[in-house]
Amino acid sequence: MVEIKNVARVDTEKCLGCAVCQNVCPTEAILVVNKKAEVSPEKCVACPNCSGMCPEDAVELVPRAEPLKLGLNWRQVDQDRLVEMCRKAHLHPHQWLCLCSAVRVRDGAAAILKGARSPEEIALMTGARTGCTVYCFQTMMRLLKAHGVEIEPQKGYRWYDSTQTLWDVPEEIVKKYPGHFLEEDKDVFRKI
Amino acid sequence: MLKQASPSYIRKSMYGPDPRKRAAELAGIGALEIRDLFPEVPEEIYREGADLSIIRNATDAALENVNMDKIGPDDSVNILSSQYGFQLMGGDAYAEMIRTIHDAVRARTGCENIRLRVATGFRIREPDEIIRHYKLDEFFQGKARGVRALDRGVPIETDIGTLYGSARVYDADWIIHAHHGELRELDMHRMINRAVKPFAMSYARMETRGVAHINFGPRSSNLIARVIFESEFVQSKFTFGCFLLTSPEGIIGVEAGNDLDRLDRKLMTAAFKSYGKIRELLSEITECIAVMDATGEPRYMVGGGTTFGNLTEAELDLFDLDIIPVSLGYGLYERPPGPRVSSVNPAIKALVLNHMWLGVPQMELPTHIPTIVVGRDLAEILDGDPMNREFMSRVVTAENLDTAMEFAYGIAKTDKVFVFDGSFGAMTVSESLADFLLDRAPEVRRRVDDVLMPKWLRQRGLDMEQLSDDRPD
């Protein structure tokens, strides 16, 4: 269970409605409506993105009255399907999905089996992607694709659909760049 | 009797507490000079506090043979920098190299539209702090801007598909790659195409940083940087690279060139010569208390000219490409293949956090080492860190450095102390650790010279002759 103690608050006097915050929010918790940013507290995971990126210093993180609790029980889903999804994604269920919040790959897979269809939904169901918001993104996308989810292109630049993996590199490219240990590194991952 | 230690300057930041009593001031702590351990480590031309004209002259000399013909007087140029360069020795040397590049380009090409881009990791506001501290916006006449992983992207077509750079990096006609040779993330780059690594990290969007960090392995990740650098898009803008070369002694020179492959070979051989023995010596340490007392996050905090990450991973020889690191980056650290080692070197018996910045997920520290946080102000900052939500529930807080050390001695049951205070030229250590390291250095020298160095070179298609070949091309 991940406890979120803070929430973003917008100073509407300062906000110019530039939408940078909307483009960097990992959970679609902040949207610009009528040229002002608005926060949905039930979706805000208090990551450092909107407050850090706002060019007008119009967003700050303030304490919540009650912590927002995020998380799920991965044992409640079909374990065979969970393992199969992880296998297709070349991930181990026990691996970290999100280092910041200590969420594992099995939690992300369980969220997808429970209906999550985007990185934003996985984040809100598991509590992942609430810190740096960067390194868990690829693992989420790999799980979604392994499950056959059709990825909707994003408006703006919240994220780009780019999920190349070691397993996708064509043979001719492996040969073109010798000394990069591509096959050897596949063996490393196979062993887990 | 050890000499007095010289800790590095601490730059004030919103990501860390105010500067406080330095660990170098503690009784029994002093400087063990690198030259007393390994006199053969490349000698510095500059160390913190020295005359910056040394850096300016070295940069000018390095740029003499660089071809700048592509750049026209009416063109725009981005000088690309990364935040870590500004953490080395107070950052003044890196800032001066950048200023010198600017002046040389303007003088030789007539170009006036020269801009600076300062890239960062997860400390989103850090570029603003850097630009303000070193007065770079004034120097670049209002054209210095930060680059974050979350900024708008630009697609880059590569041999493995579309990857994404930061649009702000590439929004000029030409780019200049201004970097450094400090090891930093050896577990990630493994000295394979080290020179181009920032093209998949500092200069890249978050998706592409993730592709390199998460989707590729512990020797293949730098392929991402390579394919980006070799893309038509980047090659259409790239002019030259300019690097501060470092050793544990300090800045050992400046290298520049249009051919990054040549620079990469220079960085590789310089890294083996500069860091090979120190890294191997760290693997000899069986017990110590580590004290963080500088700018940056612990993993990248320098002590004796080498980062704390080299101590936490000292069980493994990461120059050896047969070895698989226990890296957080690949999510492997609890079930690593290969040698069964801990994700944090168990020789670190206690960790004292006196001064540090937030900036990376680092829960592996308090979950593997008894950790003492110095001061309520640092504790408060750590408690609000979204990248390490459980950090403060796994550590204790001491009112001040003296009581923190008393507690650490009690837990660790060793008087060997290693302070990471940003110093180059000397390790800030206790007498007992100094004696231990001096005793082990000769055997480490023999092992590196006779066994390890030839292997590291062989694995990368080099031989011992190339190691000593310092001739300019």
Image: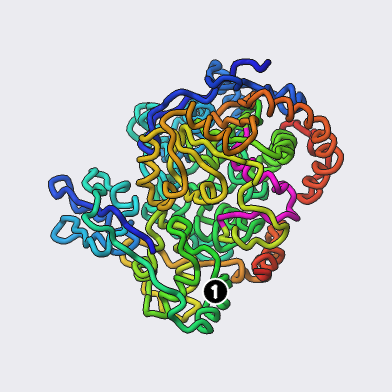
Q: In this view, does B232 lie above or below B438?
A: below
Q: Give the range drawn in magenta.
A: B306-329
Q: Name the residue under label 1.
A: A89
Query: Residue at horizontal 45%, vertical 68%?
Result: A140
Q: Where is residue B54 in the image (x, y as percent from the top left)?
A: 58, 19
Q: What element carries label 1?
A: loop
Q: Foreground: A67 or B123?
A: A67
Q: How is the image coloured?
A: rainbow
Query: Residue at horizontal 40%, vertical 52%?
Result: B389
Q: Position of residue A70 (x, y in %)?
A: 34, 65
Q: In which quarter of the image is residue B118?
A: top left
Chain for numbered disc 1: A
Q: Position of residue B206 (x, y in %)?
A: 44, 56
Residue B56 in sight in this render: no
Residue extending furthest front? Answer: B410
Task: Judge left or right: residue B160 versus residue A132.
Answer: right
Q: Label 1 is placed on what type of residue?
A: Ala
